[in-house]
Image (tube, helix red, strand yellow):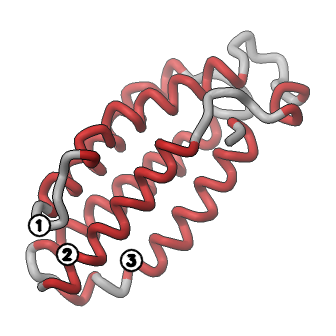
Amino acid sequence: MRRTIAVLTIAAAAVLGLSACSDSRPSPAASAAAGTSTQTAAEACTLVQQAITDATTQLESATSSDPAAIVDSMTSASQKLAAAAPSITNDQVAPLVPALQDMFTKVSDVMGAVAKGDVSKAGDLSQLSTQFDETSAKFQAVCGS
């Protein structure tokens, strides 16, 4: 069980990294390629960032012995992104929202299963780590760092 808690903590730290390292300023390429949308990339990035930050703030106070708080935070992030999605209309940022939402949903599902003792799901964390890296890289490319 200690290994499970450690894995959950590492996954939570990775998600905090997305919310902490993200900057709502778009990269120069994103600003130039913002398309015909009236919403700027910076405005859209701010909406996404706020949804993630609001949901992951509770992770800062969660301990490694409280995997339920981590799962709740991931679920909340997914729900907040779903709620924010209709407001995110920028051509560069809007396509990223479903992948971000999916990532948080999958992390919540897998971490919840592992926390309940389903160690067969622990192997999924490696795949989720890859998805996290790819998704956050796309977000960073548009929204800057």
71 vs 139: above or below: below
Secondary structure beneath dot 3 equals helix
Question: 2 or 52: which is nearer to us?
Answer: 2
88 lies left or right of 32: left
Type of residue at label 3?
Answer: Leu
37 vs 34: above or below: above
* Position of the C terminus by quadrant: top right
Label 3 Cα neighbours within 10 Å, binned few <14 / some 14-19 / many ≥20: some
Which disc is residue 5 wearing? 2
Q: Which residue in the protein does label 3 denote? A: 125
Q: Which residue in the protein does label 1 denote? A: 65
Q: Residue at x 82, y 25 (%)?
A: 34
98 vs 4: above or below: above
* Position of the N terminus by quadrant: bottom left
For discs 1 and 3, the disc positioned in front in the rendered view: 1
Tell me how far mark 2 sits from mark 1, CA to CA.
Answer: 7 Å
For discs 2 and 3, the disc positioned in front in the rendered view: 2
User: Is label 2 in contact with label 3 (beta carbons under 8 Å)?
Assistant: no
Q: Residue 40, percent across and down? A: 72, 17
133 lies left or right of 118: right
Q: Residue at x 24, y 89 (%)?
A: 120
Type of residue at label 2?
Answer: Ile
